[in-house]
């Protein structure tokens, strides 16, 4: 589902899918609590049938979500109220299969509560292997096909569980699901992308067609050719040649880059006429490092300037393979040139392991033409943190430079955040005279910053001025720069941009961080959300300036995540928490209070850690899908082992308190040292990182697999009728915390979320003093 929604909408719906899955589990627990006697009495018949209908509704949800009555668009949520209804319909469609599957699982759990450790172990191991299998299948099947495979697995499990109770209607449904699943594997559904995605707009060009399509855990990669497809970012007004037609690469429907066709026989390179050519205007660059190299445009640019050694780092392995194989003829075998070395790895991992010194370290163009709408506010960008720039600084030769460019946006965000990041990089390096190490030039559409290891020389300053004069650019930062020089060729309606830039580089940055309407403090490894600019306190002022309907289009991504959290929380209250009040007659007040606090605490703490690990391990695995698969798989397998081992313990207060104390200690330690630890092992070989990752996840996860089965066994001793209620409380808190963790990470940082996770377990520990009878 994550893969599917990332394609038709955007990646940030991944957390929504996790919340909906947990919502299904919580709602199933609620129904079990209210109708346990009837459900358990018919459990042998129901478990198989529920799994078959889980597979059936999984297929049905995907098919219905493509129809007009359920298809929503993120861009329209704040201008068309009907879109919110369609979003809720999607919640319900994806909720049903999770609910049915969880109900079957819950019946098994409740019937075997005395052996819950063993059953919970099997469940967690299966879930962990499923997460890993999903990442593997993504290499071979399209996003539209993956739900059909999952439905097939659920149906097969249901048929195995039917035993002797074989009802023709259920068998017919199982047969229909099987046939349709194989049909969708052969002929995948035609998914309709958001009309505002880059691919949708590109396919409107004359003769546009998809010539290559490859599935991968990194996303669905599609290569498009069109007669009018041209790419010229911020092209100089001095350019008077023809912009060549290019093929383009899209990942999950989003623009990834052009397939560059430059070769040594060409008289010029298109980027020579953009601000991104600034580093080459100062001097020849022999050793070049291109981070997030994409389709190789900056690599070919370096070749056109006769660079001798070029390291191209690109974490998207599927695109890298295409460039080396199917697209090699289109890019003049760019990555087979002896000067070029391709590294299919996460840029931060490469930086951590690198020892070579470079004349130029170049980052890709940031932002979007005309400014973005903040859809990537919740995406981790570890190559743009303060720690990343400090590492780049250490890899520069004495005369080396770091080059980074951005599209000009309004209100000003990306360009200011870059300036702040570079200024703080100089501070961390002990450089006080910022004006001697930092220069920038601006065109009508882009701005390029250059950070130089040694002070800019007179020759460098002259070269920057000549570069601006030749290509009709304007200097933004330069020693000895006069105010009137900043707008000779490209005027700005709002000259405050110059004031803000100067304040960030030379003045009181902290004051501007506090006063500015957007969050422009540099990203860090603890809060690696470079594109998260929204500040809640500024919303009223922004609404007054831009209009209440337009504010959402300035920072759409964070707002959608926040509202999705509120919606999921409301659904959790309606479907899980409110119905559980009917059970208040069972057990004493102290025991019910213990049930509420204990299972809430472990539900919140577990999900907080899981979400943080998914996001933190992007630094290792370079992709949200891989990070999610590996983190979830390792955590569930380790938790399953802990659950199995917990069967050896009696659910006594003393044993449970010791376990909670161990978990609290682990999480408290991670809150203060996890980021530091990951930074120091990022340079290790992949095999070593995998082993260390397993240990980092497994150490707390093994112990964290124990409180839930032990708690259910304790609940069975105190008041057996409240076992399903306890599961429902745990599920509801997991739903809310899964959505909340991502928002807290962006605002407060991973360390704060881990600290809250440790506090959650501490609260559960304290609740042990409330329970009687164990």
Image (cartoon, rainbow, N blue to C red):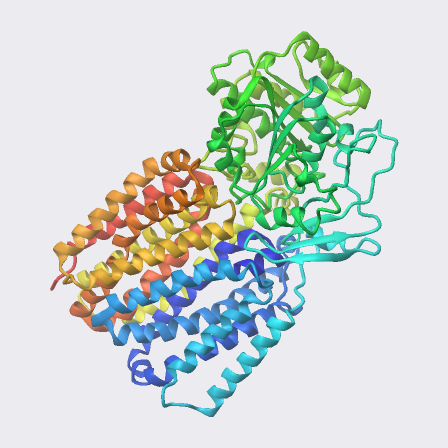
- Residue 425 appears in the rendering: yes
Report the quarter where the C terminus lies: bottom left
Viewer-proximal residue, 601 or 545?
Answer: 601
Instruction: Tell me where residue 162 appears, x and y as whole percent.
Output: 39, 85
Q: At x 50% / y 32%, what residue is drawn?
A: 351
Instruction: Tell me where residue 532 appears, x and y as whole percent.
Output: 54, 39
Q: At x 68% / y 26%, what residue is drawn?
A: 307
Name the side, left or right, on which 570 lies relative to 658.
right
Viewer-proximal residue, 127 or 747?
Answer: 127
Name the image quarter holding residue 506. top right
The extreme front residue here reads 338
Q: At x 78% / y 25%, what residue is drawn?
A: 490
Name the side, left or right, on which 13 lies relative to 596.
right
Instruction: Tell me where residue 74 appears, x and y as whole percent.
Output: 62, 54
586 in relation to 562, above or below: below
- Residue 368 appears in the rendering: no
């Amino acid at each position: 589902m994550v893969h599917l929604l990332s394609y038709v909408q955007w990646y940030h719906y991944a957390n929504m899918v996790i919340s909906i899955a947990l919502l299904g589990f919580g709602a199933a627990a609620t129904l079990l609590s209210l109708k346990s006697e009837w459900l358990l009495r018919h459990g042998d018949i129901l478990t198989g049938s529920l799994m078959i209908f889980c597979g059936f509704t999984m297929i049905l949800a995907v098919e219905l979500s493509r129809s007009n009555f359920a298809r929503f668009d993120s861009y329209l949520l704040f201008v068309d109220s009907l879109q919110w209804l369609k979003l809720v319909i999607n919640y319900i469609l994806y909720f049903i299969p999770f609910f049915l599957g969880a109900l079957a699982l819950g019946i098994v759990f409740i019937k075997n509560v005395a052996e819950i450790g063993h059953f919970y172990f099997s469940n967690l191991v299966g879930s962990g292997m499923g997460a890993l299998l999903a990442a593997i299948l993504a290499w071979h099947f399209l996003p539209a096909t993956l739900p059909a495979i999952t439905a097939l697995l659920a149906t097969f499990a249901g048929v195995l569980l039917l035993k002797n109770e074989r009802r023709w209607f259920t068998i017919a449904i199982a047969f229909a699901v099987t046939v349709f699943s194989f049909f969708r594997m052969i002929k995948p559904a035609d998914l309709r992308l958001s009309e505002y995605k880059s691919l949708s707009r590109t396919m409107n060009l004359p003769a546009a067609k998809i010539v290559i399509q490859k599935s991968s855990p990194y996303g669905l990669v599609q290569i498009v050719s069109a007669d009018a497809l041209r790419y010229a970012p911020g092209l100089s007004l001095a350019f008077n040649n023809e912009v060549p037609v290019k093929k383009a690469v899209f990942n999950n429907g989003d623009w990834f880059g052009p397939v560059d066709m430059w070769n040594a026989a060409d008289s010029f390179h298109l980027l020579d006429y953009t601000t991104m050519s600034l580093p080459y205007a100062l001097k020849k660059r022999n050793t070049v490092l291109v981070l997030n190299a994409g389709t190789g445009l900056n690599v070919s640019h370096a070749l056109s300037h006769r660079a001798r050694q070029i390291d191209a780092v690109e974490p998207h392995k599927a695109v890298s393979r295409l460039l080396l194989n199917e697209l090699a003829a289109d890019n003049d075998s760019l990555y087979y040139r002896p000067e070029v070395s391709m590294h299919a790895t996460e840029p931060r991992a490469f930086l951590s392991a690198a020892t070579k010194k470079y004349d130029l370290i170049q980052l890709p163009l940031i932002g979007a033409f005309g400014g973005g709408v903040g859809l990537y506010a919740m995406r981790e960008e570890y190559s743009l943190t303060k720690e990343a720039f400090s590492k780049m600084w250490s890899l520069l030769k004495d005369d080396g430079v770091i080059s980074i460019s951005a599209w000009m946006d309004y209100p000003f965000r990306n360009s200011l955040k870059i300036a702040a990041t570079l200024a703080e990089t100089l501070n961390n390096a002990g450089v006080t005279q910022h004006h001697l190490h930092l220069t920038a030039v601006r065109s009508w559409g882009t701005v390029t910053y250059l950070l130089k290891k040694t002070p800019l020389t007179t020759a460098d300053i002259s070269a920057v001025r000549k570069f601006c004069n030749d290509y009709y650019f304007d200097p933004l930062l330069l020693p000895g720069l006069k105010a009137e020089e900043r707008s000779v060729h490209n005027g700005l309606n709002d000259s405050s941009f110059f004031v803000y830039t100067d304040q960030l580089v030379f003045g009181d940055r902290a004051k501007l961080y506090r006063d500015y309407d957007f969050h422009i403090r540099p990203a860090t490894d603890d809060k690696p959300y470079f594109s998260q600019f929204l500040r809640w306190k500024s919303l009223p002022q922004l609404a007054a300036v831009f209009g209440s309907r337009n504010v959402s289009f300035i920072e759409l991504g964070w707002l959608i995540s926040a509202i999705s959290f509120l919606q999921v929380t409301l659904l959790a209250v309606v479907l899980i928490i409110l119905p559980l009040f009917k059970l208040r007659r069972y057990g004493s007040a102290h025991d019910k209070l213990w049930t509420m606090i204990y299972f809430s605490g472990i539900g919140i703490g577990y999900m907080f850690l899981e979400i943080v690990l998914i996001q933190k391990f992007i630094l290792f695995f370079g992709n949200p899908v891989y990070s999610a698969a590996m983190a979830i798989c390792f955590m569930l397998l380790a938790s399953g082992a802990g659950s199995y081992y917990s069967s050896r313990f009696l659910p006594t207060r003393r044993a449970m308190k010791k376990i909670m104390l161990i978990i609290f200690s682990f999480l408290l330690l991670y809150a203060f040292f996890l980021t530091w630890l990951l930074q120091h092992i990022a340079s290790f070989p992949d095999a070593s990182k995998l082993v260390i990752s397993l240990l980092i996840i497994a150490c707390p996860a093994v112990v964290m697999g124990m409180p839930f089965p032990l708690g259910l066994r304790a609940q069975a001793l105190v008041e057996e009728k409240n076992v399903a209620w306890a599961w429902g409380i745990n599920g509801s808190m997991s739903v809310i915390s899964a959505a909340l963790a991502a928002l807290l990470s962006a605002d407060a940082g991973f360390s704060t979320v881990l600290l809250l996770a440790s506090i959650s377990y501490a609260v559960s520990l304290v609740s042990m003093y409330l329970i009687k009878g164990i």
